[in-house]
Image (tube, rainbow, N blue to C red):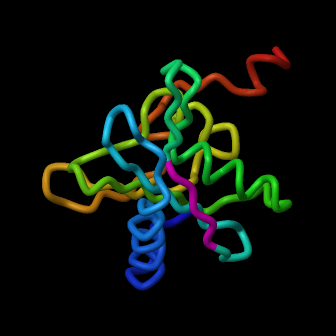
């Protein structure tokens, strides 16, 4: 997939930003919002959801994808991640989760003062996939 055009890129990032008002982060006070762009150009958001048993929490990227999947979507063009606390990119678990749905999904995030856009295969070049399971 090629990079998103500027208008679509901003719509996706704006949706990620807007979603943070729903973040549940009573322990870290670190809100994160994400928005996924489906193959049919719908934008579906998600937020981080923390839990007192820390490993039970869920990142915004996985919540956004889960929301989209639960609405019947399984093909994705892009996902944006945002936090007002500063630079953020998908964690390792989220990178693996995103890569499940295709190596060319564009990832949008702020890093070193710039809005970055790159396919998930660049963030996780040797992801584990169905190819290893079928080997």
Q: Residue at x 43, y 32 (%)?
A: 91
Where in the figure is residue 87, as x and y percent of width and height? Answer: 23, 48
User: How many marks are shown on the rendered structure?
Assistant: 0
Name the residue: 30% across, 45% down.
88
Residue at 42 percent across and 85 percent down: it is: 7
- Which residue is at the far left? 113
x and y, in percent, of residue 124 in the image: 47, 32
In the image: residue 117, left or right of residue 75: left
Front residue of this view, candidates 62 and 102? 62
Quadrant including the C terminus: top right
Image position, residue 32 (x, y; %): 40, 50
Which residue lies at the image location 61% right of the left edge and 72% below the top edge?
Answer: 43
- Give the extent of the magenta segment: 43-47
On screen, residue 94 above or below 5: above
53 up-or-down from 73: above or below: above
Q: Is 4 included in the stretch rendered in magenta?
A: no
27 or 62, which lies in front?
Answer: 27
Task: Say whether residue 90 is left or right of residue 100.
Answer: left
């Amino acid at each position: 997939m090629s990079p998103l055009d500027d208008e679509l890129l901003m719509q996706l990032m704006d949706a990620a930003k807007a979603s943070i008002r729903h973040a549940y982060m009573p322990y870290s006070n670190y809100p994160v919002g994400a928005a996924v762009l489906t193959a049919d150009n719908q934008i579906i958001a998600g937020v981080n959801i923390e839990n007192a048993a820390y490993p039970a929490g869920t990142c915004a990227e996985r919540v956004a994808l889960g929301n989209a999947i639960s609405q019947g979507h399984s093909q994705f063009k892009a996902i944006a991640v945002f936090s007002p606390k500063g630079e953020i990119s998908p964690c390792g678990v989220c990178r693996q989760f995103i890569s499940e749905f295709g190596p060319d999904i564009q990832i949008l995030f702020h890093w070193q003062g710039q809005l970055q856009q790159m396919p998930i295969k660049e963030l996780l070049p040797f992801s584990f996939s169905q190819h290893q399971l079928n080997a």
